[in-house]
Image (spheres, grey):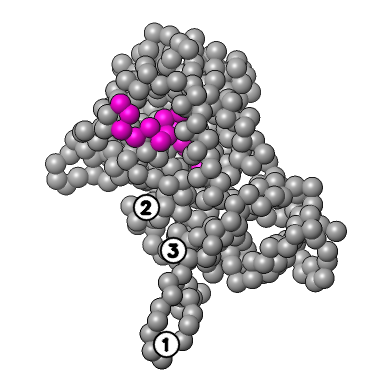
Amino acid sequence: MFDLIVKGGTLPDGQVTDIGIQGGKITAMEALGSAQAKRVVDATGDLVSPPFVDPHFHMDATLSYGLPRINASGTLLEGIGLWGELKQVMTQDEVVERALTYCDWATSMGLLAIRSHVDTCDDRLLGVEALLHVREQVKDYIDLQLVAFPQDGFYRDPTARDNTLRALDMGVDVVGGIPHFERTMADGKASVRELCEIAAQRGLQVDLHCDETDDPQSRHIETLAFETQRLGLQGRVAGSHLTSMHSMDNYYVSKLLPLIAEAEINAIPNPLINIVLQGRHDTYPKRRGLTRVKEMLAHGINVGWGQDCVLDPWYSLGTADMLDVAFMGLHVAQMTSPQEMRTCFDMVTTNNAKTMGLDDYGLYVGAKASLVILDANDPVEALRLRATRLCVIANGRVVSQTPRADATLSLEGRPERSRRRHRPHTA
Ligand code: FE2
């Protein structure tokens, strides 16, 4: 007797199978015939995927768009200034309420693991307390990992260092930083070194906002890779954004990419935000401001798309949909071959799970029973349609259902069938 059986779904690799779930775990992946279950969900003809994973988000700022005003220039720097104004007036209850609303959106989109940065440049650590509370509130359905993020600079802000250490003492999971926002290149480099040492001492992961600028001289990723190797942190470090790499000298990048690969750094480009914020100081030609995604993948570097922002001082749209993120990413990075589009789907599922170090993630016997059923034939069609999340299952429980969306046409002589699905000739 199973708690739940998901019948006849198609896995991302094309395999068709039933999935038996018991005690929050996947306990069978085979034809289950007439096996008994308390509940059966029919996924025949639909894509069954492990849940979406977002390795880069700001849940303390989300859904605050327009508070206390709009970002008029659209730049990263005005966004940081605006966020500084909001921090002065927001309350802990407001942060909790906005974050929980976002978690509801995420759940409905099958986004069940999120790494959120939380600003530690606030002597009250209001956002930290709020998101620690939210992490506890949502733990039965969302893996929420928190990064201690000194938004105003680990050294640049006079109390950021102490507050970041306090946040880690309070139970924040990952060490963050922003070396390109320190006053000098030397301070940026020193911050990378100390932040990695803190992580090594405490046995934590590192995730830095790294080189989020169009300045090709911003090379903190080099220091991050070096420190990762020096301290034996391979596989436990992420570089977020890395947009300066877009503008770097090609010869320098030819040396840099193998260094990043050797250090097993996980890379997190954030295409919606990078395409909006970067290149704002250019006239024409105007740079895309996305890091070198295909080139990193070709070097064996683990790369995954991040969402970064939804309705906040830096970004005025967003729906917690990682398929939107991957859709933008595949356009901006020109990853349009069938294989590359498939990779973009992996980048918002398995690649991001690797970055976050998630245990028991995936669709196999023994894995955590978290999965999403999509109204699509395969991962590429899921991207094309940003397909409806028909059913979301977290830890063995159905937590969200959305009706299939299709137009009903009334045309003489035309057969009734789905107007959206399509099997490509290359399949
Ligand atoms: Fe960010």
Residue 186's x, y, as percent? Answer: 35, 16
Is 313 drawn above or below residue 105 in the view shown? above
Q: Name which residue lies at 49% across and 39% down.
A: 102
Residue 252 image point, x, y percent = 33, 37
Magenta part of the chain: 54-68
Magenta residues: mostly which secondary structure? loop
Gap in angstroms between the C-alphas marked 1 and 3: 23 Å
Instruction: Name the residue that disc number 2 marks.
Output: 328
Report the number of discs.
3
Q: Earlier in the sequence, mark 1 or mark 3?
A: 3
The CA span between labels 1 and 2 is 34 Å
Can residue 408 be seen in this snapshot?
yes
Instruction: Specify the farthest residue to the right.
Output: 1
Q: Is residue 173 left or right of residue 99?
A: right
Q: Earlier in the sequence, mark 1 or mark 2?
A: 2
Residue 152 sits in which quadrant?
Answer: top left
Label 1 sits on residue: 414
* Residue 214 drawn at (x, y percent): 27, 35
Mark 2 surroundings within 10 Å by alpha-carbon count, few (fewer than 14), some (14 through 19), many (20 or more): many
- For the residue labelled by badge 1, is the local secondary structure a helix, a strand or a loop? loop
Q: Identify the residue at the far left of this view.
A: 283
Q: Nearer the viewer, mark 1 or mark 2?
A: 1
What amino acid is labelled 3 in the image?
Leu
User: Magenta includes 57?
Assistant: yes
Q: Residue at x 56, y 60 (%)?
A: 390
Between residues 394 and 11, which one lies in front from this camera angle?
Answer: 394
Q: Which residue is mark 3?
A: 385
- Residue, x 53% and y 40% (percent of image)? 103
